[in-house]
Structure formats: structure tokens, C-alpha cells
Amino acid sequence: KEPKAPHFTDLVEQAVSRALDDCKVDKHLIEFAAVGNMFGNGYGQRSLYPLGIYDIPIVNCHNACATGSNALYLARQMVSAGIHECALAVGVEKMKPGSLGGGGGKRDPTPTSLDFHYKTLMDAFPLEKTPPMAQFFGNAGRQHMKKYGTTKKQFAMVAEKNHRHSANNPYAQFKTVYTLDEILESPSVHEPLTKLQCSPTSDGAAAAIVCSEEFVRKHGLGGQAIEIVGQSMKTDANTVFSATEGEEVMKVIGYDMAKNCAQDVYTQAGLGPNDVNVVELHDCFSCNELITYEALGLAKEGEGGKLIESGNATYGGKYVINPSGGLISKGHPLGATGVAQCAELCWQLRGECGKRQVSNAQVGLQHNLGLGGCCVITMYKKPTEWSHVPPKREVTGALGFAPDAKL
């Protein structure tokens, strides 16, 4: 008999309980919660009340695929503004099988969140009978190929890397390692994208505790604390919908948002792309990861293909990008993805990831995109002043909270 699938409340219970256990913080110390979910209303209260979390502000938020990072952004804003000392960010999603729709490109005059984006897409390419999201990102890939000479093989190399990385992640939805030829020869979804270059529909939840520095010191949490040294949220620039012919779809999928966000974060942190060791990047499709290398300054404009081909996006290279397996292989439960990226980077910077650990990880960068549009980029660093402080908990979540995953 097939086991009963967990409800969203079960997913949140596990994620929040594990976050509290990891942090060694009592639930009654939480002063604020932001809960991200794309397809439901009021999930925050319904999920947190059974855990005994009452009588605090609970904000329900959704902002396309950047929903999880919106929850993280709100929690961090509350703490950094001095309004609350301890906040909870949660993301959760239960998804139906099949590719995502988009609601645009139809004759129905009802406004949708992607009206402007669809117009840009349709002005550049005729609509095809393929999944809408694959058309956005696949057509952006086509423009990148035409403008810069990027190849189908280079896009496929992104997926090969991420599937390979996921083999060592206990949370990954898929752990099968594929050859480059298998990636290229998997069923076509929308040229140049094949099935194994697309993120799946997923169920999941993630949670993070965001505290002030004073709270960390007061409760002796320095041994596991990771600092957010920069964070920015941007929406589409008005120039996106009047971009130069031949790059308009690349712009409309979030290139400018990511570039503007990244510059903001680098300024806040006093660090740049050359300081980054590990990256969790929104690879909803392989094309998006490669194009975003350039927006984040990890590669020069037009040279994303060279970066993946050089080996500098995986272990032994300059960066390790998506050690979790990314959305393509770890999975993409929309509301949870942004918080799950945060968890992975925190574990990496603590040095707790076992076989998938990035060597000498000191600075982490997170990129979470929502078409429509929203981009959140966050930079993390392990505070050097607490490097000598041992963690309070005994088992790391990085390895699935297994009993043998002792520190």
C-alpha cells in the first residue's frame, strides 16, 4: 500500500520543528512569522497554530517562485528594523502534477500577472504548443545562443552538473546521475530544453530562524549562527518591456532584476562575486542558470557558456553552484524554494554537508526569481568572531537529521 502523502501542515510541522531544534530556540521566543505559499490562503495560521505558535503577527505572502525568499526578506526586515528580535520564515508548497501554466497569451481579457511579460514574449516568438514557462526560459536561451554563440551542449552541462550534485543531498527529489548525452537525448520540452533540464513539480517545506545579533549573544547561539551580510529585492525595471530586439526575452525572465539586486547586495556587503565560494541559484530551467551567471557577475556578459564549460561552476572550480542539486534535481516546491536555498547555504558555511561540502566555504550567495516579476538575492557569511564557539545542537540537519549525522 502506498504511504499517505503528507498535508501542507505536516510539511510545515517537520520543517519548523527541525529549524527550532537546529537553532535550540524555544518556539515561545518567536515574535513574528512570515509564511510563503503560492497556491493557498491563510496557510500560515493553519500551519503554525498546531505547533503552539499563537498571538504573534503572521504574514502570509506569495510572489511567484520567489515566494520563499519573500518570507525570508520580511523576517529579516523585521529584525534589522529593530521591531522584533526573533522571527520565523517558512515556505511550503503542495503542487499538482504537470507543468505550470501562466494565464497569459489567451484572448480572455481578464488581467493576469504576466500580461506584460507575455506580450514581450509573443512579440519576439510565436506561441507554441509547449509549456508556457519553458517557452519563456527556452526562448531566452535561444536568444543567448544567437547573440553569444552559446550551445545546446553548454545548457545541458548545467543540468548534468546539478543532477550530479543532488546525488549527495538527502533532501533531493531526484538523485540519479546522468551523462551529458542522456541529458541531451531526453525528451524535448521546448528547444533547446529537454526534460532533464527542467525543474519538476514538487512538494516540500523549509524554515529558517532570523535573529538579531543581540539575541544570538544572549542565547549563546554563535556556534551555529550565519550572518546575512546583504539582501535585496527588486522588481522589473521599466526598460525591460522595451528592451533591444534580440535580448528582450532574456530581459523579461529577470536578467536586469538579478543584475540590479546583485549590485545592491555587493554594495551592502562590501564584497563582490570574486569573494563568493558557494551559490544557490534559481535554475528553474538550465537556460536560466547559465544566463544568470552573467547577471550576478560570476561570468562576463556572453560568457556564461564558458563558465560552465571551464569547470568553474562545480567542485574543484572557482565556484560551486547549486551543490544541493538546484531546482532541477533537488526539486522546486514554489513557496519553499527560497527558504530551502537559505538552509543549504547555512549548512555549507557551517561546514556540515558531508560529501557535498564545498571546500573552505566562507561566503554564500542566493538567487531566487519569480517571473512576473520579483528577484531576491541574499549574501551570507560565517561570522569570524564566533568561529571558536561550538554549536549547541548535536545533529546537523545538512545530512537529513540522521542519528549518525553528529557534529
Image (tube, rainbow, N blue to C red):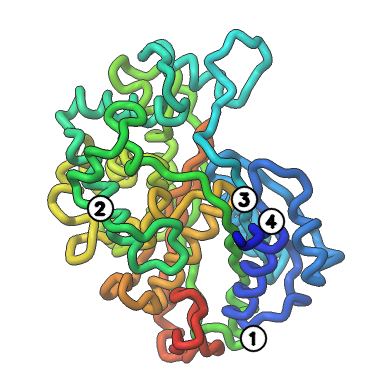
Q: Position of residue 359 (x, y in %)?
A: 26, 74
Closer to us: mark 1 or mark 3?
A: 3
Q: Position of residue 271 (x, y in %)?
A: 34, 59
User: What's the distance in space between the residues labelled 2 and 1, CA to CA?
Assistant: 45 Å
The amino acid marked with disc number 4 is Phe
Question: Is there a contact, CB below 8 Å, between mark 4 and mark 3?
Answer: yes
User: What's the distance in space between the residues labelled 1 and 3, CA to CA?
Assistant: 32 Å
Is residue 99 depicted above or below 282 in this figure?
above
- Pick whichever of labels 2 and 1 is earlier in the sequence: 2
User: What's the distance in space between the residues labelled 4 and 3, CA to CA?
Assistant: 7 Å
In the picture of the structure, the residue carrying the numbered disc 3 is 93
Closer to us: mark 3 or mark 2?
A: 2
Which image quarter is the C terminus in? bottom left
- Pick whichever of labels 1 and 3 is earlier in the sequence: 3
Q: Element under label 1?
A: loop
Report the side of 317 relative to 334 (left or right).
left
Report the side of 201 relative to 357 (left or right).
right
In the picture of the structure, the residue carrying the numbered disc 4 is 8
In the picture of the structure, the residue carrying the numbered disc 2 is 178
- Pick whichever of labels 1 and 4 is earlier in the sequence: 4
Instruction: Return the residue nearer the eye: 123 or 275.
Output: 123
